[in-house]
Amino acid sequence: MKKQKTIKHVYSPILLLLLAVFFTGCFDDEEKTYESSADIPVNREMIAELTSPPHVPTPIGDRKAKKLIVKMEILEEEGEMTDGVKYMYWTFGGTVPGSFIRTRVGDEVEFHLQNHPDNKLPHNIDLHAVTGPGGGAESSFVAPGHSKVFSFKTLNPGLYVYHCATAPVGMHIANGMYGLILVEPEGGLAPVDKEYYIMQGDFYTKGANGERGLQPFDMKKAIDERADYVVFNGKVGSLTGDNAITANVGETVRLFVGNGGPNLVSSFHVIGEIFDRVHVEGGSLVNENVQTTLIPAGGAAIVEFRVDVPGSLIMVDHSIFRAFNKGALGMLNVTGEENKKIYSGEIRDDIYLPEGPGIQTMPTTDEIVEADIPAKSFEEQMEFGKQAYMQTCFACHQGEGQGVPTAFPPLANSDYLNADVDRAIGAVLFGLTGEITVNGEVYNSVMTRQTLSTDEVANVMTYVYNSWGNSGQVVTREMVEKVKNKK
Ligand SMILES: [Cu+2]
């Protein structure tokens, strides 16, 4: 009960006890115990641990306020936005978002901003955690081959964005110059099992989404807010496949989520999970039981939840075309024991006939309405197949069968498709899950069973095999029957 001593006002001991109970674990009112956080004394000096996303430095726990030395190096370097698409990123610490800085209230941060001599431009830094002109921007403006030092005291606990504020500001941010700085309250945030760092950003390239080569920044599109890429952690696929973040069933997870913008607001959502607690806008207000949290450009949120069942949790900006078409999609892979009480998986697939005699159960997967007139020729197969493709497969595999990097494999020129017809027919009939490799890229996702009739499957597969450089295989209804009966 150390903190009671410093409370300046007179409270009844009972009220004090209640306050202590209610406020432990969150950003609490403790700091009000000092006349101001500015009065928190610092003892000794330490070099700040900086981490690149999705990692965060060690929690502050109960360490005392210190003089914290942060050495941040600005690097302008080429990177990959997505397969075959290069981009010239401007970074704090060599990554987008920049290195994560973890402090506590009362720390005196001595900030060294170093502009690498190979860089072409001057930069600076505006930290939203700073109380002072420009958030440090004015004191930190630094030319290539120079280093600037300024210092500030962290007064307010919370999760804050930092970014470059050199003109044209929008361009510096659009090129990746942003990151997060956490100011923990006295005593630290409540411990959790896993912590990760995720930051959304929108990118504007001369070429359209997916256009290959080194893509320069497009000022016009940026002003019009027409993003070609909206991504987590600087590139498409930074948090999918091998880069997915992980947790075990039963663990508590804390995500430090920021939004660098420059333009778009994020509707951050994790498919199949409810946020137990959200530090709204990264501040002290805690909301509970939240489905989607809004993260403004230049803002952040701390999201906490316990993972109860195994599976792949998909993190998205729920402005959903950004997730499935522009890159704002990440994965949290949860491993461990199933819990059928919380989630059963599919129990049964019933045919639902509103005007019929009731609900009929469907014994196997193949009782799909077979009302189609079979195609009479290859041309008809192609025509019907294309229709079916545009109605069912298009949403995921895309118009030209090109797929979506890291999420949906290509059907165009697909070695997986061309290697084994029965297997491909099976994918459509029964669905497909687990790790597969298509044209050298690993996918580990879920394709649900497609509810198509035997003829429709034959037609759509014939269409796929006779488009976009595939083998030219013709798929007959007999071949589809054969695969069905094998199962
Ligand atoms: Cu800059």
Image: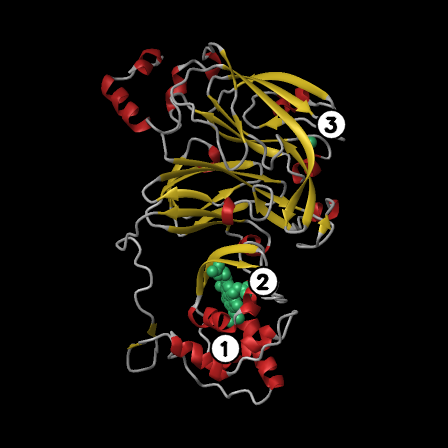
Q: Which residue is mark 3?
A: 122
Residue 127 on image: x %, y %: 58, 27
Q: Quadrant of the C terminus?
A: bottom left
Q: Is residue 5 above or below residue 314?
A: above
Between disc 3 and disc 1, the foreground one is 1
Of all residues, the one furthest to the right in this rendering is: 120
Q: Is residue 297 above or below residue 71?
A: below
Under mark 2, the amino acid is Pro
Q: Secondary structure at mark 3?
A: loop
Kindly tell me whether residue 240 is visible in this rendering: no
Under mark 3, the amino acid is Pro
Name the residue at 66% across, 48% down. Answer: 225
Kindly identify which numbered label has been placed on residue 410.
2
Q: Which residue is mark 1?
A: 457
Kindly identify which numbered label has been placed on residue 334.
none
Mark 3 → mark 1, Cα distance in angstroms: 59 Å
Residue 229 on image: x %, y %: 63, 49
Under mark 1, the amino acid is Val
Of all residues, the one furthest to the left in this rendering is: 14
- How packed mark 2 is, by other alpha carbons closer than 10 Å (few <14, some 14-19, many 20 or more), is many
